[in-house]
Image (spheres, helix red, strand yellow):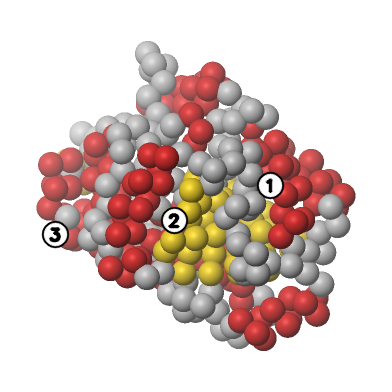
């Protein structure tokens, strides 16, 4: 056994309100979800852990985290669909809460606050966390039929989600808001985790690099340990093109949404994205940095409402 690695008790990079700031307590998690026990074993340092290269272990850990921290009774996703790292997803939600708070004294809570998850995926993860932490309601949209079926099953399988989450199929493969945000409907924010890569080959190369860095040797094939369908991992033009198209379409819904947001994986995507946002005359643009372990993540937020319109929005809806 190697010398025990010293870990800080608190993961200081995670959001102060995150439930995941301390290291996983596998004994507590096993009590919440007994099926996790089969995957928990001492690692080379003697600490209890799971094999993060085993998709079944990652799935069991996610189920336990969702049950223990967010009261989720039912959570199943189809094989080979994206199994999201929950602490990072929770950070996006907590930072959205700070964005909505603005300069106010309190975070707006309750089902009258509505978010749109563009590309909700099979896991329905953002609505789960946002509803539990802040009581928000959600629209979840996706173009993929299997993802829609899975997200609806999760919504129906959890009593608190039934009345607070509505899953809508996006029938137009190149649309983000059209056909999803109804005429006269208002949403307080949109969230999105866009496909990072520009091709399947790029996605596989990135996965191989990640595995090599973690294991110290080149693996024989790309094992995407969090799974993922093609539409979840890559799109023509990568995230830069995806976010650009989203921004252009968002202009048509500028009076129906307070804050549009999207995760940005690559720092190089920021400069061209700012350029487009200035071109479409967004009135306010923010980049919110998020630290997760060794990785720095971020999301970009924009609005087309003037300061007065933003104030009026909050007075009417908060």
Name the residue beneath numbered marker 1: 246
Image coordinates of residue 138 in percent, x first then y, are 48, 64
Q: Which residue is mark 3?
A: 31
How far is the residue under mark 2 from the one under mark 1? 20 Å
2 or 1: tag closer to the N-terminus: 2
Mark closer to the observer (1, 3): 1
Which picture quadrant has residue 29? bottom left
Q: Look at the numbered disc 2 and give the secondary structure of its residue.
A: strand
| Mark 2 lies on residue | 167
State which mark lies toward you, 2 or 1: 2
- Residue under the image location 78 percent in, 64 percent down: 304
Q: Does residue 65 lie above or below 188 as drawn?
A: above
Q: Earlier in the sequence, mark 1 or mark 3?
A: 3
Horizontal side of residue 261 vs 229, given as left or right: right
Question: Is label 1 in a helix, a strand or a loop?
Answer: helix
The answer to whether residue 298 is above or below residue 258 is above
């Amino acid at each position: 056994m190697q010398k025990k690695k010293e870990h800080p008790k608190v993961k200081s990079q995670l959001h102060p309100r995150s439930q995941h700031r301390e290291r996983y307590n596998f004994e507590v998690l096993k009590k919440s979800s007994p099926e996790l026990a089969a995957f928990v074993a001492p690692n080379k340092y003697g600490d209890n852990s799971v094999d993060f290269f085993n998709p079944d272990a990652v799935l069991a850990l996610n189920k336990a985290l969702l049950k223990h921290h967010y009261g989720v009774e039912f959570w199943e996703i189809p094989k080979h669909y994206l199994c999201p790292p929950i602490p990072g997803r929770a950070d996006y939600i907590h930072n959205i809460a700070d964005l909505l708070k603005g300069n106010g004294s309190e975070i707006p809570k309750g089902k009258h606050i509505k978010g749109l998850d563009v590309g909700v995926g099979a896991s329905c993860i953002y609505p789960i966390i946002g509803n539990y932490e802040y009581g928000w309601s959600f629209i979840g949209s996706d173009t993929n039929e299997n993802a829609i079926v899975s997200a609806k099953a999760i919504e129906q399988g959890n009593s608190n989600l039934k009345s607070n989450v509505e899953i809508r199929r996006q029938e137009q493969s190149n649309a983000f808001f059209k056909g999803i945000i109804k005429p006269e409907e208002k949403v307080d924010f949109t969230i999105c985790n866009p496909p990072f890569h520009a091709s399947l080959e790029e996605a596989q190369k990135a996965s191989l690099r990640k595995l090599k860095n973690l294991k110290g040797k080149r693996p024989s094939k790309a094992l995407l340990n969090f799974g993922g369908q093609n539409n979840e991992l890559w799109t023509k033009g990568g995230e830069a093109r995806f976010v650009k198209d989203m921004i252009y379409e968002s202009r048509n819904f500028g009076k129906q949404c307070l804050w549009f947001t999207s995760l940005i994986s690559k720092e190089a995507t920021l400069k061209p994205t700012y350029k487009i946002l200035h071109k479409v005359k967004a009135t306010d643009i923010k980049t919110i940095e998020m630290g997760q372990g060794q990785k720095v993540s971020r999301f970009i937020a924009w609005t087309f409402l003037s300061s007065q319109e933003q104030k009026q929005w909050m007075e009417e809806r908060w």
